[in-house]
Amino acid sequence: MLLSMEHLRKEYPNGKIAVDDFNLQVGRGEFIAFIGTSGSGKTTTMRMINRMLKQTSGTIKINDKDISKMDPVKLRRSIGYVIQNIGLMPHMTIQENIEMVPKLLGWSKEKRAEQAHKMIELAQLPDDMLQRYPGELSGGQQQRIGVVRALAADQEIILMDEPFGALDPITRESLQDLVKHLQEDLGKTFIFVTHDMDEALHLATKVVIMSQGKQVQVDTPENILRHPANDFVTNLIGEERLIRAQPNILSVSQIMLKNPVSITPDKTVDDAIELMHDRRVDTLLVTDDAGVLQGYVDLEDINRITDPHTAVGDFTNRQVFFVKADSLIGDTVDRILKQGVKNVPVVDKDKHLVGIVTRTALVDIVYDALRGAPEANEEPASPINADIHAAATHDEGGEIPQ
Amino acid sequence: MMHFLATYGTQLIAKTGQHLYISAAALALGVIVAVPLGILLTRMKHGANFVITLAGVLQTIPAMALLAMMIPIFGIGSTPAIVALFIYSLLPILRNTYLGMQGVSPTVRDAAKGMGMTWWQMMIQAEIPLAAPVIMAGIRLSATYVIAWATLASYIGAGGLGDFIFNGLNLYRSDLILGGSIPVILLALLVDYLLGKVEVAVTPRQLR
Ligand SMILES: Nc1ncnc2c1ncn2[C@@H]1O[C@H](COP(=O)(O)OP(=O)(O)O)[C@@H](O)[C@H]1O
Ligand SMILES: [Mg+2]
């Protein structure tokens, strides 16, 4: 593990227990978001990682080395640090700011300058900005510099405490793209404190939800949306966001009806009519003895058959549209609705029939999702939706070959 | 005027030299003591108010009384004068150093430490440069005080331009009084102007 935190506890001198039994394992290239109510201990936890604070008990290890045995100054130079109010040195040029840690580490002037040019390019800002002072830049530009400054000495771990909290939404989004790029393409590891749930869900590979110094839930954004651990998490995520995210986190199996009415091909027309009557349905799914979906028969087909002893298998419609149980609703809904059928059979990965999805159940979910997101028209691809979409499998079932 | 200069020209230069020496020595001591003390005060949880109040009290002692108090300790001459003026110079420098250092944003300090600066590096590379304009303003104010009050140093035999003024007062000679006062005023204005330049120079471009 790149970073491991075990049984961390922080009690301030005034007796306030800010962090209690905090445990986290962070692998290289992960993006960890700490989120929680104000005062839940996020900043305290983060600042123990670069020894800006000393834990009361517990251990923090980086690459299996206990940080309490390291020189704190050296430790801090090896960890990137970005804070909300930017923290650029107002009396230094942008170049001097970027070169701060490399200079502390004793890099040569040439190497430092080369790095400064590289970093400003990474920040997607013009090279001549290096000679300007922080006060001459916009807030967003300053924080871009703040972010790349934290990488200028090739730091592997970057700590960020609500870095984009003070920025307008558009600037914030473009900075989120920047850090996401740094994590995904450069393999940097981020520990990121935020109070913005969309930001956490959009950026993180793992979200740590905190309340009153304790971890309430630690999981991937998808799992947290899918299974909020308790009411606190549900509230934090927000009812609306949960509804909006539903098509992208609910799988078909979660909304399907189990035990669909089915019949085997060797049964007769009489058997079929009796079953339909008993269960008050107009369609029967046909499965073989092993439960593998073969097709369907409906009342119209049966009406056309004159011989009551005809086997069901002889007039089964084999062209049946189905979906897989583990596919996400968001990925299948369009196809299901376009088919114009009332019910869609659901199969597992071996094509065993496991359930049925009704058109009504689907429409309900899609309708809620739209209603839950009135701004959906303005930003058709909201960050969470877009992301989980991309991560989802596109294995959506299809039709049984003839 | 020409007559005055012709008669007292060399003496004037010598006295101005003494005056400058006493002032500069007192100010230099003031800076050496008050700047580090001011910085130290910002690192202390308690005591800052006490020390600044104490310096304020010292400053309210009448100049003549303070000078007179120096005689039993240091005798007469320039040493007691320098010590007395040094005490006067403390307060503005101390107070401005304290305020200047307090005024460095906690964010900047946090960032500097978090990026791996040692205590000294934080001082030299971040905090003092950022507090420098305010500290410099304190030094400038002290300098003007010290030059003005150095006039009184003549009273305890330290020399300086005050000699002209006290002689003038004793002899009812207004040319001597003016001949001493005008150079003091010019000196104070000149030093204030020059230190003003320094103040601008130490102010980071972006903060001017
Ligand atoms: N220096 C301190 N002394 C005492 N209590 C503190 C100190 N810093 C923070 N706290 C308290 O510890 C708790 C956690 O604070 P913090 O880690 O800043 O929370 P967060 O970053 O999640 O808002 C809060 O209740 C806060 O009031
Ligand atoms: Mg915080």
Image: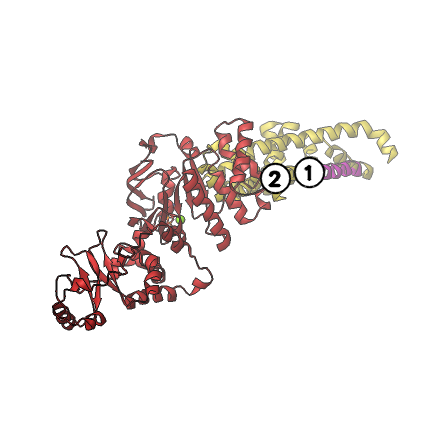
On whether residue A147 falls in the magenta region, the answer is: no
Q: Is residue B189 visible?
A: yes
For label 1, count other residues whose C-alpha is less than 10 Å away and answer few (under 14), some (14-19) or many (20+).
few
Q: In the rendered structure, the residue with mark 2 lies on which chain?
A: A
Point out the image quarter for the N terminus of chain A.
top left
B188 drawn magenta: yes
Amino acid beneath label 1: Lys
Q: Is residue A205 above or below residue A235?
A: above
- Magenta residue span: B177-194
- Percent x, y for residue B41? 49, 39
Left or right of residue B100: residue B185: right
Residue A54 image-quadrant placement: top left
Residue sitting farthest toward the front: A307
Q: Position of residue B162 (x, y in %)?
A: 73, 34
| Furthest residue in direction right, as rendered | B3
Chain letter, yellow: B
Quadrant position of residue B132: top right
Q: Nearer the viewer, residue A191 or B173?
A: A191
Question: What is the chain letter for disc 1?
Answer: B
Overall secondary structure of the magenta section: helix
* Residue on which the image places disc 1: B197
Picture residue at 53% right of the left edge, 37% below the top: A97
Left/right placement of residue B156 relative to residue A177 reads right
Rendered image quadrant of residue A129: top right
Which chain does the red colour mark?
A
User: Neighbour class for label 2 at 10 Å: few (<14), some, many (≥20)?
Assistant: few
Which residue corresponds to mark 2?
Answer: A128
